[in-house]
Image (cartoon, helix red, strand yellow):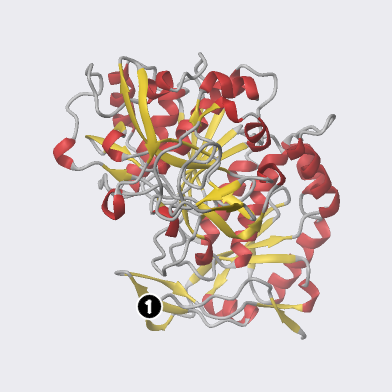
């Protein structure tokens, strides 16, 4: 049978990886296959009209989207036939998400995709790895666009940082603070009145969990009603607190508490998935196409440098973000906490994905000071390597989107150039852990920062705005770039290679929110 290498599927070994040996051939795996979109040209034309804000362009509901641009039944059948021929079972098939999940032994997957799965060790953990490309029969050429889950190496990291324990707070409602509760920040940023009633905020998490008792105590301490929080299992992951506030539990609790405190009338739905490329893609597609909970805004505080993604997984996630935009779902994504090199350490500049997708609202970080209920100073968050730095820069992958045409990129040496590719971030908000967010994690009151906090901050704002509209704001980048006065321009500071200045910059984007003006711009 003639076979071909799947474009974008090649995997290179990570530096420092030690191969332990071949995995047990009887080990049971589940692997997600993504298939092509129906009517791709029509979809791209619809998307272009929508993001330009053309008159008459409108978002699609989930059912209409699935019918027009989901998977073709014939393509799903072709994948099913391939699975049967190799002794693999179809355990899930979703035309809207364009995904098919196959189950079977490692030996059968090795044979089906012409790969050699190995058990490897890296950074103190073990995972299932592979190198080289994935091969498919020519009968599936052009049909299958990604095969995710053969390799389950950790794909992303959470973008949050705890403040030093010696500066931890004693109570979340004291009068004079060097840190802030989410409602205090909503007031400082002049968020419009409302509680997000009738909206659903989706949150993607790749590990950890929350304790209902913590949420109850946290919101009670703020004098806010407890929002409804629902956990959704993706790929067998679940709400599993680890007991470590500095681990993924810190991310989960902060995301829920920040978004929930700003929009307590909204339902919070948390999509738990494994930390792998397959888990990330499956979590986002599940959230975007969730016809039961129907989130109108999604917050993502996980990511990793663009180069750390296999092209097939990066493309699959970007296509999910495009789908979200076409259905009127705003997706807020943290831009990273490691400055202009995104922690790569190779001497170059890098940005974080999925924040670098043109269809994400990339959220950078600032350091905020306030007095008597007013912002007195706001600069780019740059606490150095130990304290964290706002992520931002220029994508190596994505072309310049139309809404960023004509912008200039200022560097820290005083130079400037016309922005040539997708610039990150789009917006910003308080992120320095030294001026951070007061949250409750695993029974501990802590102050947390990071661009992870900025994504749910903006998600809460969008939920408030959506609650006052007849339809969700949806993809908002074009309108924000067209109305920069709706944001507080950050003109001081840098994130390493790039400097802040008047207008958009690669540290703080367009700036932090002036909530009522943002509502007016949308």
Note whether 344 is above or below 107 in the view shown. Answer: above
User: Residue 384 in the image: x percent, y percent?
Assistant: 30, 51
Note whether 148 is above or below 445 in the view shown. Answer: below
Q: Nearer the viewer, residue 262 or 164?
A: 164
Residue drawn 57% across the image and 20% down it:
517
The residue labelled by disc 1 is 17
Q: Residue furthest left?
A: 166
Quadrant housing residue 474 = top right
Secondary structure under tag 1 reads: loop
Residue drawn 52% across the image and 16% down it:
192
Classed neighbour count for the residue bearing mark 1: other residues with Cα under 10 Å, few (<14), some (14–19), many (≥20): some
User: Residue 170 in the image: x percent, y percent?
Assistant: 17, 27
User: Residue 175 in the image: x percent, y percent?
Assistant: 23, 16
Whether residue 230 is visible here, answered yes or no, is no
Q: Is residue 444 left or right of residue 146?
A: left
Q: Is residue 170 left or right of residue 283?
A: left
Q: Nearer the viewer, residue 183 or 52?
A: 52
Image quadrant for the C terminus? top right
Note whether 353 is above or below 390 in the view shown. Answer: below
Q: Nearer the viewer, residue 282 or 350?
A: 350
Whether residue 264 is visible here, answered yes or no, is yes
Numbered marks: total: 1
Quadrant housing residue 74 = bottom right
User: Residue 39 in the image: x percent, y percent?
Assistant: 85, 52
Image quadrant for the N terminus? bottom right
């Amino acid at each position: 049978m003639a076979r071909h290498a799947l474009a974008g599927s090649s995997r290179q070994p990570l530096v420092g990886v030690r191969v332990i040996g071949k995995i047990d051939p009887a080990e049971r795996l589940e692997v997600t296959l993504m298939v092509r979109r129906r009517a791709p040209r029509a979809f791209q034309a619809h998307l272009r009209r929508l993001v330009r804000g053309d008159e008459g362009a409108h978002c699609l509901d989930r059912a209409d989207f699935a019918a027009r641009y989901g998977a073709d039944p014939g393509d799903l059948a072709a994948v099913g036939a391939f699975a049967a021929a190799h002794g693999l079972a179809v355990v899930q098939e979703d035309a809207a998400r364009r995904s098919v999940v196959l189950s079977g032994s490692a030996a059968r997957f090795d044979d089906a995709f012409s790969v050699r799965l190995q058990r490897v060790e890296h950074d103190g953990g073990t995972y299932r790895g592979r190198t080289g490309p994935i091969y498919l029969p020519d009968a599936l050429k052009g049909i299958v666009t990604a095969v995710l889950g053969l390799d389950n190496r950790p794909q992303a990291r959470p973008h949050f940082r705890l403040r030093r324990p010696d500066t931890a707070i004693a109570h979340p409602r004291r009068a004079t603070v060097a840190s802030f509760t989410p409602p205090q920040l909503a007031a400082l940023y002049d968020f419009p009145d409302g509680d997000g009633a009738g909206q659903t905020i989706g949150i993607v998490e790749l590990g950890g969990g929350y304790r209902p008792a913590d949420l109850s105590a946290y919101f009670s301490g703020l004098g806010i009603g407890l929002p409804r929080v629902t956990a959704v299992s993706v790929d067998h992951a679940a709400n599993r607190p680890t007991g470590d506030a500095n681990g993924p539990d810190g991310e989960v609790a902060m995301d829920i508490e920040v978004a929930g405190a700003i929009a307590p009338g909204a339902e919070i739905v948390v999509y738990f998935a494994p930390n792998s490329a397959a888990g990330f893609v499956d979590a986002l597609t599940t959230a975007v196409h969730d016809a039961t909970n129907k989130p109108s805004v999604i917050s993502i505080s996980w990511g990793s440098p663009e180069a750390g993604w296999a092209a097939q997984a990066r493309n699959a996630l970007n296509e999910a973000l495009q789908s979200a935009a076409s259905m009127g779902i705003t997706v807020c994504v943290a831009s990273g906490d490691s400055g202009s090199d995104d922690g790569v350490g190779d001497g170059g500049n890098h940005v974080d994905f999925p924040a670098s997708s043109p269809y994400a609202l990339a959220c950078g970080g600032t350091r905020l000071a306030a007095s008597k209920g007013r912002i007195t100073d706001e600069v780019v968050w740059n606490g150095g390597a130990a304290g964290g730095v706002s992520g931002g820069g220029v994508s190596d992958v994505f072309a310049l989107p139309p809404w960023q045409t004509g912008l200039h990129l200022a560097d820290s040496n005083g130079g400037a150039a016309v922005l040539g590719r997708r610039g990150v971030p789009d917006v910003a908000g308080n992120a320095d852990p030294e001026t951070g967010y007061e949250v409750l994690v695993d029974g501990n009151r802590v102050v947390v920062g990071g661009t992870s906090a900025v994504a749910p901050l903006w998600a809460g704002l969008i939920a408030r705005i959506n609650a006052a509209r007849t339809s969700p704001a949806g993809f908002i980048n074009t309108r924000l770039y067209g109305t920069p006065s709706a944001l507080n321009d950050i003109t001081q500071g840098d994130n390493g290679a790039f400097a802040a200045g008047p207008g958009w910059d690669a540290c703080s984007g367009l700036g932090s929110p002036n909530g009522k003006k943002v509502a007016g711009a949308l």
